[in-house]
Image (cartoon, helix red, strand yellow):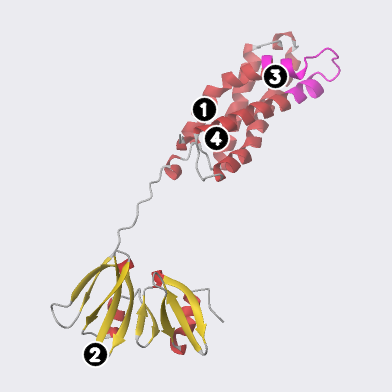
Amino acid sequence: MQIKNFYIQSISKQLLIGFFIGLWLFLFLYFVEPFDMYQLRPSERSFAAFGYSLVGVLTYIIIIPIQRILYNFGQSWSLGKEILLLVSLLLISGITSFLFFKFILLPNEPNTYDFGFFFSQRVFPTVLLILPMMIFLRWMFGDKTHTETISVEPKETTIVIKGENKAEVLHLKEAELVFIESANNYVKVHYLLQNTLHNELFRNKISVLQKEFPFLLQTHRSFLINPRHFLEWKRASSQTMLILKPNVTEIPVSKTYKKALLEKFVNPAE
């Protein structure tokens, strides 16, 4: 289950949520005086409320990198990941708030609560009270635009290859054209039809087709290739060749065009 609106990439938004959590904690602990807060003196109560609110802020800051790690597994956000994040928040807040309670708020008190009681009777209820507000803030600040972007596949370009004769017309998708070779006063167009390589002759010049279809690369004075079908380089004696898929077709490469092709395809056969 995807809950994209709850993922927050912005650090500043995360820190703002942490601030609101800390503020809510301070107001709740200071004015409501839950649990045994009422037994503290006013100065101690202020210190306790401030300390626990600071613990809440620091806890949320600690889980920011945890959220990023969880998101990086699959580059998505789901209900399971949100629950894992909340469990991390609960455990970390339990540990940090107990350390504050034990060693800072009441360091000299011998009969304080143990961790189990403190976690179940103090931390867990408080986190449950914070949870609705935190979920609302995470939804409000969530990266809605970033995560809900729908990727639209670009429409495949259709090309029309023509010869000097009006009847010589071939309609292809750009990806279906594999290569063109010169054959005297004709050009032989090699193309894919239902994943099978076919060819047709047209009375035309290779230079004319190169101007018409600039995406084609010239490898030789007699050859133009569609770079989409490049597979690998091949060196045969003194001749460098390009291998095109899907039929492992060898295309000669002349010295004139070799440098430009090496820059385009980074796997040369030396």
Report, in whole angstroms, how far the alpha carbon at label 1 lies from the one at label 2: 72 Å
- Name the image quarter holding the C terminus: bottom right
* Amino acid type of the residue that numbered disc 4 sits on in the rendered structure: Lys
Answer yes or no: do the residues labelled 1 and 2 have beta carbons within 8 Å?
no
Side of 184 where 129 appears, left or right: right
- Distance from Cα at disc 4 to Cα at disc 1: 14 Å
Using the image, tell me which numbered label, if any, was put on residue 31: none
Q: Which residue is mark 4?
A: 81
- For the residues bearing labels 4 and 3, Cβ distance under 8 angstroms: no
Residue mark closest to the camera, 4 vs 3: 4
Question: Could you tell me how far apart the alpha carbons at marks 4 and 3 are, in whole angstroms?
Answer: 23 Å
Residue receiving disc 1: 135
Q: Locate residue 57 relative to residue 240 in the image: left or right.
A: right
Which amino acid, by three-letter code, is at mark 2?
Answer: Asn
**Of 135 and 253, which appears nearest the observer?**
253
Residue 245: x %, y % from top left:
41, 71
The alpha-carbon separation of the residues under discs 2 and 4 comes to 65 Å
> Quick one: label 4 or label 1, which is nearer the N terminus?
4
Residue 89, above or below 203: above
Camera-side residue: 14 or 176?
Answer: 176
Q: Which residues are magenta?
A: 98-121
Q: Position of residue 196 (x, y in %)?
A: 31, 68
